[in-house]
Each structure stands twice: as C-alpha cells, then as structure tokens.
Amino acid sequence: MSGRLTARAQWTIVALVAATLGAVLLIANRTIGDELYLVGIGTRAPEFHAATLDATPKPRRIEDYRGSVVLLNVWATYCQPCIVEMPSIERLYHDYGPQGLRVVAVSVDDADKQTAIRDFVAAHALTFDILYDPSGGIEQTYQTTGVPETFIIGRDGVIRKKVIGASDWDSPGNRALISQLLHETAS
C-alpha cells in the first residue's frame, strides 16, 4: 500500500476540496456579490433600504411594493435632469396610480438634506412616494452609474426596463409599457 491512497482517503480529499471551494464561493458572494450579478432587464429587483421623510422616518424596502408595478427612480435634488423628468413622472403617476402603479423616488442626497428634499417635493407638487437614502446604498445595490436612473419593475418583481438619464415618462411608449404591466398578473 505504499504510495497509494485508499478509496476512503480519496473521497475525504474530494470532500475537503469541495468544502473549501464552497466556502470560497460563499465568501466571494458576500463580499463582491454586487459585481458578480448584474442588475438589469430580466433580473429580480434587489432589496434596498430607504426611509420616508416623515417626522419619524419609516423604513421602506422593495418588498413593501411587491405585487405592484413599480417605477423606481434614483435621484437627487441637485440633479438638473432629475428636475426635468419629475413632472412627467408625476403625470404618469396621476394617470396610472389609481390603477396600481407605485412610484418610488429614492433621493441619494447627502445626509441632513431632508429639508431640501421636502422643499423640492413641495415645489414640484409631487404626490408619489419619496424616500431618502443618504448612505447611497441603493446606488451600489442597483449598480447605478449616476442620477437619475430608473427601473420599471413588474408585479412579479422582475425589472422590465432600465433607463439611465432623464426620460419623458409621459410618452406614448412609456405609457403603453406601464399599461401593459398593469394588466399582467403577478406570478
């Protein structure tokens, strides 16, 4: 038996290698998972954490909107293209909100900018959900390249459209997409 491994020893080595590989993959997934899985059309909308602008902020997550068609907009008060597109988002919400569209605009302004965000919302008469993520965690989770960036999410939680930069959300094409998604059932 000199120099030869028994079948048991060989299986022990295989098990150790598999366990080591599994541990390495688990650690890689936890540390660089955002880079391993691209967020885009056809992927499940990842979880985010933001808060309302109420006197006592309430935490919100994507899970709070599951089962709805969601327009998720990542924006900031200093962003000129964000300012340009907000009226079209409000018009879209005004027309499709009663049918089930949820608009969730997450501000990534710096910490302690709640007053500036509230003033922005009031000045533009925005009536949809405005959330605040001063940590910018949503930018990393959704792998945004800047602001504004918008994701249309179906009732099933899958991203159906991703737009980098400002868009006319009141356009016939965007309205047709929202209408179509509102008529789909969640699976």
Image (cartoon, rainbow, N blue to C red):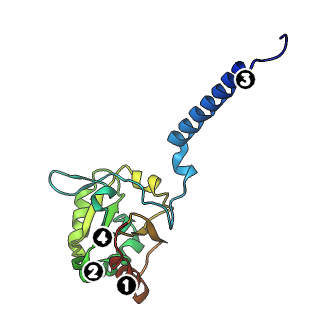
Disc 4 residue type (three-letter):
Val
Q: Residue at x 33, y 54 (%)?
A: 133
Q: Position of residue 117 (x, y in %)?
A: 26, 62
Q: Is residue 126 above or below residue 34?
A: below
Please say if the residues under marks 2 and 1 sit with CB atoms less than 8 Å apart: yes
- Identify the element where label 3 is drawn: helix
Mark 4 or mark 3: name the one nearer the start of the chain. Answer: 3
- Quadrant holding the N terminus: top right
Q: What residue did someone put label 2 on?
A: 96
Please say if the residues under marks 4 and 1 sit with CB atoms less than 8 Å apart: no
Calculate the distance from the C-alpha at mark 4 to the C-alpha at mark 1.
Answer: 14 Å
Say few, some or many: other residues with alpha carbon within 10 Å of mark 4 (under 14 / 14 to 19 / 20 or more).
many
Q: What residue did someone put label 4 on?
A: 103
Calculate the distance from the C-alpha at mark 4 to the C-alpha at mark 2.
Answer: 10 Å
**Quadrant of the rendered image containing residue 179:** bottom left
Mark 4 or mark 2: name the one nearer the start of the chain. Answer: 2
Q: What residue did someone put label 3 on?
A: 10
In screen coordinates, is 76 left or right of 97? right
Q: How many marks?
A: 4
Q: What residue did someone put label 1 on?
A: 175
Calculate the distance from the C-alpha at mark 3 to the C-alpha at mark 2.
Answer: 63 Å
